[in-house]
Image (tube, rainbow, N blue to C red):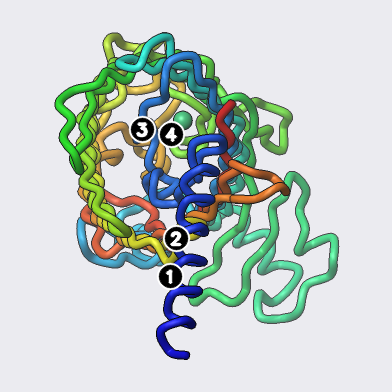
Amino acid sequence: MFKQSFLVVSLLTASCSVLAAGNHHQDKKHNALGHAPISIMADHLHKQGEWMVSYRYMDMQMSGLQMGKEDIGLDHTLSAEGKNYMMAPKDMQMKMHMLGMMYAPSDNITLMFMTNYLSNDMQMAMRMMNSMNGAMNNDMSMDAPMSDDMSNMGNGMSMDNSMAMQHMQMQTSSSGLGDSRIAALINAFNGDAYRSHFTIGLNLPTGDVAQTRTDNEGNKITLGYPMQLGTDTYNAFAAYTLTYQADQIQFGSQFNYETALEKNDAGYQPGDKIVWHNWAAIGINSDISISARLSYTDKDNFKGQDKKLNPMMMPSADANMRGVKQLDAAIGVNYVFNGKLLNGHRVAFELSKPISQDFDGIQMKTDSSLMLGWQKAF
Ligand SMILES: [Cu+2]
């Protein structure tokens, strides 16, 4: 009896394996592990003739100021006894919609095009001017609750009584097309479990760097560097990507370098940038994988200065306060649909937080960054 059952089970298992193998040849099984965490660009090549379309959404939150590695309060940044700035950023939200396309003219080369649409919102704090303090003291006590039209002074300005020192608040925003990128991914050495490729590419200056706000008198005032949409320069970039993939585990590393090839019309050249991603991912099954990533970023200060910006006015207008050395940690999930519904569609998300940030001068800290993505190859 036992022997017969064993035989039946063995036969069933064998026939299932044969069927599965047959299916595999007709309709290849997609593996979630096949792609890097969603924040990593240009991580894979395609087979000759294959296309891929991707969409990514990024939401980044920034708040609070840091000088070098140390926190610095708004009061100290704005007060005459402190850093004596007229204005300083309080917090910022950046939303980015990224569209990507890949096409492989051969098995050894995949071409890539990316562009993005950005929208930025920044809350700024302004030092109260003495004349304004005087005018207000004549009519009212600063501690008294303010009427609606006093607390909202037009152009998004409002009073903030919650701070120890009196600051004005101002909301600024910018939105539009960001920079675009073209790149070629070129196969390097590949083994059974190892894959590697080079990426060379060009950043195209499709993003505007002359975003403005309108002041009370109707003048256009150029916004600080973090609120601009692009670089207005052609930048060359290169990367080397290495992945090791065993059965249900993937390790990857990608080293990126980018340098601007010129000075822009505004009068500056963005600093060189190094980004080094390292990640590990495990496949829960073929449909779903989870990942952990550690990334190091080193950005240089800008060379030159936007002629329309006054670096004495606010830290975010200073070309020498753009550099940063930053370590980020991220966790992510990749999911690929295997089945009749949405077969081959990939969706992914990743949440990233800085472990350490070391700024040149005074800059706003990043709190967290979330990325959602969708990819489909044809
Ligand atoms: Cu692709």
Towards the viewer: 230 or 251: 251
Quick one: label 4, few (<14), some, or many (20+) residues within 10 Å?
many
Q: Nearer the viewer, mark 2 or mark 4?
A: 2
Q: Residue at x 54, y 27 (%)?
A: 52
Name which quarter of the figure residue 249 lies in.
Answer: bottom left
Q: Which residue is mark 2?
A: 14
Quick one: label 1, few (<14), some, or many (20+) residues within 10 Å?
few
Q: Which residue is mark 1?
A: 10
Label 1's element?
A: helix
Label 2's element?
A: helix
In-image side of 95 versus 73 (left or right) = right
Q: Amino acid at mark 3?
A: His
Circles 2 and 4 in contact, beta carbons < 8 Å: no
Which label's residue is closer to the chain start, 1 or 4?
Answer: 1
Q: CA distance from mark 2 to mark 4?
A: 64 Å
Name which quarter of the figure residue 64 lies in.
Answer: bottom left
Within 8 Å of ligand 1, the CB of disc 2? no
Residue 308 shows up from this direction: yes
Q: Amino acid at mark 2?
A: Ala
Quick one: label 3, few (<14), some, or many (20+) residues within 10 Å?
many
Task: Point out residue 100 in the picture as x, y percentages from the top left corner.
Answer: 54, 27
Task: Point out residue 146 in the picture as x, y percentages from the top left corner.
Answer: 78, 72
Q: Residue at x 31, y 11 (%)?
A: 263
Within 8 Å of ligand 1, the CB of disc 3? yes
Seen in the picture, residue 10 relative to 358 is either above or below; the reply is: below
Label 4's element?
A: helix
Q: Amino acid at mark 1?
A: Ser
Q: Which residue is mark 4?
A: 225
Which label's residue is closer to the chain start, 3 or 1?
Answer: 1
Towards the viewer: 368 or 150: 368
Q: Amino acid at mark 4?
A: Tyr
